[in-house]
């Protein structure tokens, strides 16, 4: 995903309010061993990117930030929303280096939830864990992990250990935790 960003000068609250009033988002770009760089993200462009991104996968989405004529690979480390409007107030980006492992949360998606045997018998599919924390190189970042729940019956569960880890991806989360269970209503 590409985003055009511009540098900004750290200053008064009124300047940040003006950035938001113009429909843009104040942000900070962090790079290893350097002080955070204040930037401005185009609000409408970021909203288009968010709309294209599958729900829950923002934490594993790699962005190409176009800053001062350079393209920099980064991920969203933190995002702040307005409580009432859910508008984006602030974003923290972290630069990705090809040789430096990164730790992030990868979402879990359930496949065949509609065909789940336990759900057909009146049960409810309850997701216990939504993300798996992993460590990997930027080239190995998965979009999401898929778990097939079609064969689960009432009272049955799947642990995180059933998630197939691609090569180069090391889980940090306890893999003995239950990811999903089919429970009675």
Image: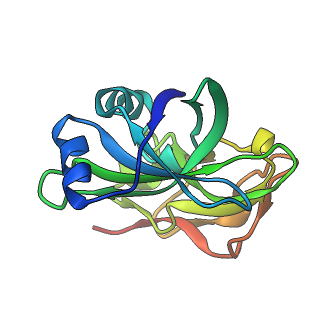
Evaluate whether residue 156 shows in this view: yes
Identified at 26% across, 59% down, the residue is 12
Q: Position of residue 51 (x, y in %)?
A: 35, 30
Residue 176 horizontal side relative to residue 125, left or right: right
Residue 121 horizontal side relative to residue 143, left or right: left
Residue 132 horizontal side relative to residue 87, left or right: right
Which of 134/98 is in front? 98
Quarter residue 104 falls in: bottom right
Residue 71 horizontal side relative to residue 24, left or right: right
Q: Position of residue 50 (x, y in %)?
A: 38, 35
Evaluate whether residue 149 shows in this view: no
Quarter residue 113 falls in: top left
Identified at 79% across, 42% down, the residue is 140
Up-down relation of residue 177 to residue 11 (above or below):
below
Q: Position of residue 103 (x, y in %)?
A: 69, 61
Up-down relation of residue 35 to residue 73 (above or below):
below
Q: Quadrant of the C terminus?
A: bottom left
Up-down relation of residue 17 to residue 22 (above or below):
below
Identified at 59% across, 46% down, the residue is 75
Which of 146/89 is in front? 89
Q: Quadrant of the N terminus?
A: top right
Which of 21/55 is in front? 21
The structure's colour scheme is rainbow
Which of 133/2 is in front? 2
């Amino acid at each position: 995903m590409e985003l055009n960003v511009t540098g900004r000068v750290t200053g008064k609250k009124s300047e940040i309010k003006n950035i938001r009033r113009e429909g843009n988002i104040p942000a900070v770009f962090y790079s290893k061993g350097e002080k955070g760089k204040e930037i401005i993200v185009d609000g409408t462009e970021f909203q288009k990117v968010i709309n294209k991104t599958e729900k829950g996968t923002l934490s594993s989405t790699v962005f190409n930030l176009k800053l001062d004529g350079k393209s920099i690979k980064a991920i969203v480390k933190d995002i702040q929303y307005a409580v009432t409007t859910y508008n984006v107030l602030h974003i923290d980006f972290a630069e990705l280096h090809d040789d430096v492992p990164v730790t992030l949360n990868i979402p879990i998606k359930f496949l065949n939830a509609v065909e789940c045997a336990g759900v057909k018998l009146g049960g409810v599919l309850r997701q216990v864990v939504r993300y798996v924390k992993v460590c990997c190189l930027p080239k190995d970042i998965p979009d999401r992990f898929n778990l097939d729940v079609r064969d689960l019956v009432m009272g049955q569960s799947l642990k995180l250990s059933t998630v197939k880890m691609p090569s180069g991806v090391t889980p940090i989360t306890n893999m003995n935790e239950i990811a999903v269970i089919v429970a009675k209503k």
